[in-house]
Structure formats: C-alpha cells, structure tokens
Image: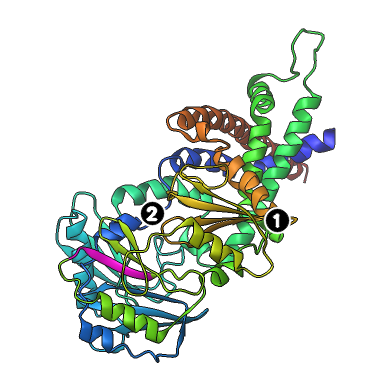
Amino acid sequence: MRLLIILHRYVGVAVGLLMVLWCLSGFVMMYQSYPRLDPGDRLKGLEPLRLTAAQAAAVAVPDDATLYGLRVEMTAGRPVLEVQRGPRRRDVIDLASGEPFEAASAGEALRTAMTFAVANGVAGAPRNLGLVEVDQWTLDGINRGGPLYHFAFADPARTELYVSRASGKVAQETTRRTRVLAWLGAIPHWLYPTALRQDPRLWNDVVVWTSIVGTFLTVIGLYIGIARFRRYKNGRWSPYRGWFYWHHITGLVFGVLTLTWVASGLFTMNPFGFLDSDVGLAERPALAGTFTGAQMKRFLAGTAGVAESDLATLEAAPLGGKLFVMATDRQGRVSRLDAQGRPAPLTAVEAVSALRGLSGRKLAGLDRLDHEDAYYYSGFDRKAQFPVYRARFDDAQATTFYLDGRTGRLVLALDDTQRQSRWLRTGLHDFDFFAGLRTRPVWDLVVLLLLAGVTGVCITGAWLGIKRIGRDAAAAWGVVRRNGRAV
C-alpha cells in the first residue's frame, strides 16, 4: 500500500494540474468548442449561382470520363465547377473561362470575404492581414489546400475571415468571443496550441500518454480511497484530515466518474487503433456509384439559366449508379433533382434497390426514422438531419447503415466496434446516454454538478501535490545546508 501511495502522490504531482486544466476548460467546452465556420453561414455568404448554357457546354471534361462527384457554386463572381475524377483527383474549372481554376487573387478573396460579411451582418471595413500558412485558427486541416488570405473586420464582434487561395472560398470564421473562449476551453482541453498541434504525431503522442498517466493516477487513487474507507476507532470513516480528508471523500464520491472521463478522453484519440473499423468504407462509394462526363454536361445544360433563383450550390449525390444532384439554396433548403433536372425526392423503394445492390450484404430490414435513436442523434455541435433510412443487414456484426432521407448518402455506418465506440467515447465523455439526458437544460444541470465534483477531486489532489513538492524541496534544501555546515 505504501508504494501505491507514493506512486499516487508523485504521479499526481506530474499530471494533477493538467487534470485540473482539463476540468476547468470542460466547463467552457459545454458551451463553446473550437471555432469553426458554420455551414449555414457559409451557404448564406455565397453569391446566388449564375450559370449559362454556354458556360455549361464549355466544360472541359471528356464525355466518357468516369466521375464520382461534382459541385458548382460561385467564387468571386464566377461559377466554378469541382469535378471528382477519382479518390485523389479533383479538377477545378472556372466555367466563366473554361480554364482550370488556378488560384484566387487578393482582390477576388476580398470580394468573397465582403460578400460573406454583408450576407451575415458583419459590418465594418476589412483589413487584409496577408497570406497565412498556419496559425492558431487554421490548425484543423483548414489550410490543407495551401495558404489562406486573412481578413479582419472592424465590427463590434471583431470578426476575422480566412479565404482559401486555392479554392477562393471562405474556410474559417472567428470572432473575439470564440477566440477568447477557445483559449479558455478547447485549446487547453485538447492541448491545441499551435506549436504542438502543427506536429500531428507529436500532438497525438502527448495527448495519448498524458491521458494514460491520468487514467493510471485515477485507478490508483480509487484503490487507495476504497481501501482506506472504513470505520476507525475514533468513529470517523477516513484516516485523513484537512485537504487530505476532502480529497479522500470527493475521490470516493466522484472517483469513478473521474476515471470514466479521463479514460473516455483517451478513447477519443483511438490509441493504438483499438477502436478501428472500416465499416462503410467500401460501401459508401459502391452505394453511390459513378456517372459520366456526358451525363454531367447534360444536367448542367438543363439547369443553366438559374439567375432568378437563390440557388447556392449544385452537388452530385449519385445513388445506385444513377446521377442525382442536390440543389441547395442560401437558406439551406435542399431539393433532389434527377439527371434531367426534375425534382426526384428519395423513396424507400429506391433506397432498398440501392442497398440490395451492395455486394456481400443481405438486407434484413429498412426503417424510416423521423426522430433520433441511440446512435443517430444531434450532438452539441452537430445537427442530425431527418428523415433517415435505417438499414439493417443480416450478418454477424449486425451492420446498420443510415441513409440521408433527402440525398440517399450513407451518413452513418455501424458494426460492433462502432457501437462500442459510441458508448466508450461519446457516451462516457459527453454524458449523452439517452434522449432525455441530452435535452437542455437537463444535461447542463446534471453535467455542471458532476463536473464540479470531479473538479473538486482534481483541485484537492493538485494542491496536495504542490504542497508535497514544497515540503520535499524544503527538506532537500535543509539537507544541503546541513552538509554545507558540516564541511
């Protein structure tokens, strides 16, 4: 037992303050995560799509080309087409000139930023802060396509926008509020400072191993706390006094919860790949299928001349080897069109036909859901779209697919590993086990109370560690002074 106590004491010195930081930043993370461009704001900030028949006919893609995806939207006043020619090949074509889209100029990026700002109520004149390769707000793969133009607006919210030079699109939006709260929440919680996060392998190793040490510390503490909890001769149930007493009692009450939170934080990193799953990886493209360059050109020619509409994007959503396109307006309303540009809402019969075409999969049943279930639900920073079709397959893993009821796309795939991941990662860490608990403010009240208790465990432990360092340092200094006098 003495060895365990010593281990707990000094491991606590090593990671105690970090665990306090994780807890305190967790309060902020309940209400503000890392800054991200809101999809609705992005749509609203696009110019209405303007596509002519001549532009559609000039697309430089061979008629017999096999295509996996397409997307058309306005960039700096001109329609731009993105064509997916393969898993790693994406051609970007300026439909105004028929030439490849090379890069957005500073002036074009400014126009894009201004259009976005006006549509989303961002006032004030923008300042071009130049090209950014990477900074604190572009760490999350936002700059994968290359540098970004950085604009700062003189509005009350102190909005900043990042426009990709490669695509000419707005890639990130932050405000003074989201930046400040990120420094208090997501950045310390995820250990996300630029110097560490821009080295993905180092960042992953640091987060994984500090979480492992934190888990080890909590397990030892639970064992010691339970072993020391008994009736003593003086009538007390704890042998400790002062800070040690409060650490013992809060550890007994909230220790298991502390363990589940630090361990589930570790699981979110999928250490050593123990929650790896490839379910849906092959089925997603197989379910969609492909289409040809000729089919794309016919569709674009048939839908040209949309100048009077508020259309923002056209995006391919093929299903079962047939071309369908999602037309989304700037308010986020989606219409599914067939290859001739006619409305074609997804039907259950169509979904079943596509699912039965999957090689090696035997469909056991299909349900249409208009509400959440245990696996497909809205999170605190994501919105589940309904309806969805839930397809159950007859196999050893009880594989389940969820198809977006508007587009037919595979939005979620489950096997046994993914189900375990849902409970071990998001269930334990977000405390969202069932619909009633996810309802706010019920979730807020429960999590605030529990997180306060866990924070108490970590603060008392960290303070005891700090005091121990002070005592050890004083004792060591005393030994040095005595040895010095003896000499």
Residue placed most toward the observer, 173 or 415: 415
Q: Is residue 311 above or below residue 10?
A: below
- Magenta residues span 309-315
Residue 229 pos. (x, y %) = 77, 20
- Residue 473 visible: no
Q: Which mark is residue 394?
A: 1
Residue placed most toward the observer, 88 or 339: 339
Query: Of the residues under marks 2 and 1, which one precedes in the sequence?
Result: 2
Q: What residue sits 33% from the left and 74% below the top?
A: 340
Give the labeled residue for mark 2. 35
Q: What residue sits 37% from the left and 70% below the top?
A: 338
Residue 392 pos. (x, y %) = 63, 53
Within 10 Å of disc 1 (Cα), the crowding (few <14, some 14-19, many 20+) is few
* Image quarter in which the N terminus is found: top right
Q: Which circle, 2 or 1, is nearer the viewer?
A: 1
Q: Which mark is residue 312?
A: none
Contact? badges 2 and 1 (CB < 8 Å) = no
Q: CA distance from mark 2 to mark 1?
A: 41 Å
Residue placed most toward the observer, 215 or 346: 346
